[in-house]
Amino acid sequence: MEIVKRQFVLNKGSEKYIFRYEPGQEGLLLDALVAAANDARTDFDWFDAAVVSFKLTQSLIHQADEILYKDLTDPMQSCRRDVE
């Protein structure tokens, strides 16, 4: 079974930062962002870490939505029935 890796790429000036991780290892990705922001040898700063962590959050929300609504033909229609 092949493990699918995910990645985020941040282009900053002439530098490119690539963060790859396996599903379920998002905490390690956040640790890597902190380490990169603390590393004085790079231009990666706390704003950059915030941007990548925000993109990670958006990705996780999207994945959760796909799982929650994968069997529904019209998620909004289901919500309306629950309200009535």
Image (cartoon, grey):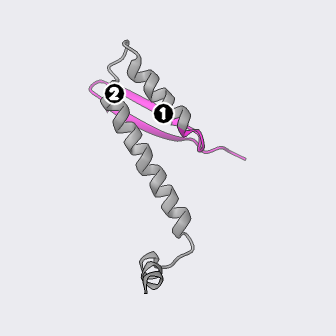
Which label belongs to residue 46?
2
Q: Which residue is mark 1?
A: 30
Q: Is residue 8 magenta?
A: yes
Left/right of residue 39 with respect to residue 72 in the rendered view:
left
Q: Three-letter amino acid code at disc 2?
A: Trp
**Please, which residue is most extreme toward the front here?**
84
Q: Eyeballing the image, is 68 above or below 61?
A: below
Q: Nearer the viewer, residue 75 or 41?
A: 75
| 25 to the left or right of 43 | right
- Residue in the image at 65% along x and 43% along y: 3
- Amino acid of disc 1: Leu
Q: State how many labels appear.
A: 2
Name the secondary structure under disc 1.
helix
Query: Within the magenta stretch, is there residue 34?
Result: no
The circle drawn on residue 14 is none
- The 10 Å Cα crowd at callout 1, few under 14, some 14 to 19, many 20 or more, is some
Quadrant the C terminus occupies:
bottom left
- Residue under the point 40% across and 36% down: 9
Pick out the residue farthest to the right. Answer: 1
Mark 2: which secondary structure?
helix
Which segment is the magenta one?
1-26
Q: Position of residue 19 (x, y in %)?
A: 47, 33
Residue 40 lies, with reference to residue 82, above or below; the image says: above
Q: Residues within 10 Å of mark 2 (few under 14, many from 20)?
A: some
- The quarter holding residue 10 reads top left
Q: Give the x, y percent position of residue 45.
A: 33, 24
